Image (cartoon, rainbow, N blue to C red):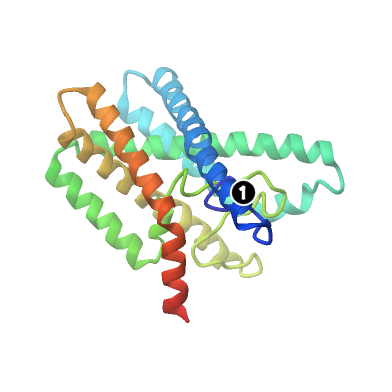
Amino acid sequence: RGSTAGITDGLRGHSAVHYAFLTLLDTLLSTLVISPLVVCYWRGTWGIMDVYVYPDNPGHSGLASLASGLGGILVFTLGQNPLARCLHPDRHRLVYYLCSRGYTAVFGFCCVNSWRGAWKLLDLYTGPGVDVVIAVTLSAVVTLAGARTLRNISAPPFAIVTDRREGYFEVPTMFKYGTRETWLYVLDCFFSVFVIGTLVVFVWRGFWCLLDNYLFPDRPDLSALGSLAMGYFLVFATFATQPLMKALVSRIDG
C-alpha cells in the first residue's frame, strides 16, 4: 500500500542515482499505466450499468446501483476479519489467489456502483446548477475536513494499492473499533461506508460539474483534453515537489 506502484519499496539503502531512477520509473508507471487502466475499468463498468440497469429510468437505476454498491461494501467491511482468517496463501495458495482476485473484482464492482448511484441521484435531484453544486461540494469538503477524512478524496496516481497479501482484505474504518465491541464496530463500518464514502462522491461530482460548466462547456473534446492536460500537469508537479515537502514537514516536526 502506498502512493505509487511500489517499485522503490525497501530500496532506500541503494545509491542515490539508482533510487532516483526507480522513483521516476515508479511515478511514470503509476501515472501513465495504472491510472488510465483504473479509469478504463471504472468507465467500462459504469457504462455497462447504464446500458443494462433500468436504462429508461434514471431514478431506479441510481437506486439499484446505490443499494448494491453500498450494501456490498458494507458486507466486505463487516467481514474483513473472517476473510483474512479463512484465506491465507501459506495454507491454500491457489484457493487464496482465486478467492482474493474474485473478491477484488466484486469489491471493485460494488465501489463503481456506489459512486454511480450517488452520482446519478445527485444529477437527478439537485441538477448541474453552479450554486447548488458549490453548496453541496463545500458542505462535503468541510464535513470531511472536520472529520479528518479529507484524504479519502485522493485517487490514482496519488493513492495506489498493490496486491500484496499483507492486509489484503483490510478495509479501513474511521473509528477503528475491533470486532469485540460488536455494535460499535457495526456502527463504525456503517458510518465509514454510508457517510464518509458518499461525501467523497459529493466532492468528486462537484468539481466534475464545475469543470463541465466552465472548461469549454460547448466543446466536449477540448474540455476533455483540457482536463487531461491540467490533471497531468498537477500530478507531475505534485510528484516533483514531494521530496521538498517531505523535507519541510520533517523540519517542522523536528
Q: Amino acid at mark 1?
A: Gly
- Return the x and y of residue 88 as percentages of the image width and height: 79, 48
Q: Is residue 204 visible?
A: yes
Q: In the image, is 114 to the left or to the right of 125? A: right
Residue indicated by mark 1? 6
Q: Residue at x 22, y 37 (%)?
A: 211
Q: Residue furthest bottom?
A: 254
Picture quadrant where residue 233 is located:
top left
Q: How many marks?
A: 1
Position of residue 15 relative to residue 24, above or below, is below
Q: Residues within 10 Å of mark 1 (few under 14, many from 20)?
A: some
- Return the x and y of residue 5 as percentages of the image width and height: 58, 45
Q: Residue at x 53, y 36 (%)?
A: 34
Q: Residue furthest right?
A: 91
Q: Residue at x 51, y 62 (%)?
A: 188
Helix, strand or loop for disc 1: loop
- Return the x and y of residue 153 as percentages of the image width and height: 39, 51
Q: Nearer the viewer, residue 156 or 80?
A: 156
Q: Is residue 120 visible?
A: no
- Return the x and y of residue 168 as percentages of the image width and height: 67, 49
Q: In the image, is 57 to the left or to the right of 215? A: right
